[in-house]
Image: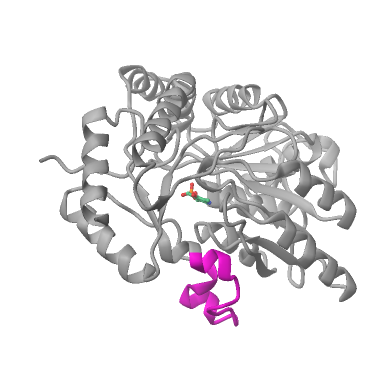
Amino acid sequence: MEPIPYSCQQISEDDIAAVVAVLRAPMLTQGPEVPAFEAAFAALHGGGEGVAVANATAALHLGCLAFGVGPGDRVWTSSNSFVASANAARYCGARIDFVDIDVDTRNMSVEKLAEKLAQAAREACLPKLVIPVDFAGLPCDLAEIRALADQYGFAILADSSHAVGASYQGKPLGDFADIRVFSFHAVKIITTGEGGMCLTRDPALAARLRRLRSHGITRDAAQMTSPPPGDWYYEQIELGYNYRMTDLQAALGRSQLSQLGERHAQRIALAARYDELLQKLPLKLPVRRADRVSAHHLYVVEILSNAPEHARARVFAALRADGIGANVHYIPIHLQPDYRALGFGKGDFSVTENYYDHAITIPLFPGLSAGQQDRVIASLQRALC
Ligand SMILES: *Cc1c(COP(=O)(O)O)cnc(C)c1O
């Protein structure tokens, strides 16, 4: 039988036509497609400005730089994430630390964050920036984190790599973070092959992100140290990068965006069907929250067992043997060897570690058929009984 991947990009004929049209156009990069994609993406998220970049890791790096994060600054994120969420702060020389997750949402725990902030305030070592991660597409407790940010004076760089299409309190995810980052890697909700986006309501932050994305160069006379002698002139006024997205990618992104509503509806329906059909198995299923709609990027089940490591490895192997692309999200970042070398270790974030020991991601993507989904469920059932 055909293997079932855990995720799979959806490329339509419209997507292909959009990319081909750019190949025939004069500009392959730095043309009109990037600003058009940025505008469409921002509009879908309730306004603000989009800044498209090469990938979400670059977006996170630029986000940290835009807030002035540098050596000696503290940045906190969630250890239940892809390594990029934490690496970005380290690129800037910052000291990274983590906040444990909530046992149900698997997102950064607001209670743990509040406790850690109170202690950090006493010890005068508050973070400059917090990077909450909307794990699996479920938005974090944004209002509570915003209130803590206002109280303690840190900025919020939200990692919404999983959350394209999600909403919170009936609104798209534009509000509640100073900068919000999205990923368009091939396994994510919409794709540009590789790609990322920063979204912000703050025009000054957007301008800074744009400049940092392209070498720290400005063509705006008002920002220059001397009057421009002619139209050729530009100035590099800070150290930036080449983190630009191409027009080929932006055209693909804009075309993908036009299919987002339909694809999101498919993800919602598939997740609801898993919820219903997996109910009787010894599994903890993803939680729902009445005040927010998940993007349903991942469907993660936790195996209810007293010997989790053993049970998880066995179930994982059984699914893979049945041709089912099971996966695990995530190995806690703080347990990676490169993070252990910074002094982190087992026991530091016990809820995250315990979750990891039990977790398996099962296939979820638009285009997963009911028959394929039934095969996943039957395989899980066999493995668990
Ligand atoms: C995929 C992902 C990233 C990195 O995205 P890229 O576009 O591959 O750089 C960052 N954070 C999270 C949570 C992700 O899932």
Q: How is the image coloured?
A: one colour
Q: Is residue 264 left or right of residue 23?
A: right
At 55% from the left and 71% from the top, the residue drawn is: 334
Residue 8 position within the rendered picture, expressed as x and y whole percent measured from the top left: 32, 38
Residue 29 position within the rendered picture, expressed as x and y whole percent measured from the top left: 49, 33
Reply yes or no: does residue 7 show up in magenta: no
Quarter assignment of residue 168: top right
Q: Depth check: 94 or 313 in front?
A: 313
- Outermost residue, front direction? 280
Reply yes or no: does residue 349 show up in magenta: yes
Q: Is residue 383 left or right of residue 152?
A: left
Can residue 379 be seen at all in this image of the molecule? Answer: yes
Can residue 127 be seen at all in this image of the molecule? Answer: no
At 45% from the left and 40% from the top, the residue drawn is: 297
At 37% from the left and 22% from the top, the residue drawn is: 15
Q: Is residue 72 left or right of residue 319?
A: right
State the quadrant of the N terminus.
top left
- Outermost residue, left direction? 1
Residue 287 position within the rendered picture, expressed as x and y whole percent measured from the top left: 53, 43
User: What residue range appears in magenta?
Assistant: 333-354
Q: Depth check: 365 or 114 in front?
A: 114
Q: Is residue 291 above or below residue 62?
A: above
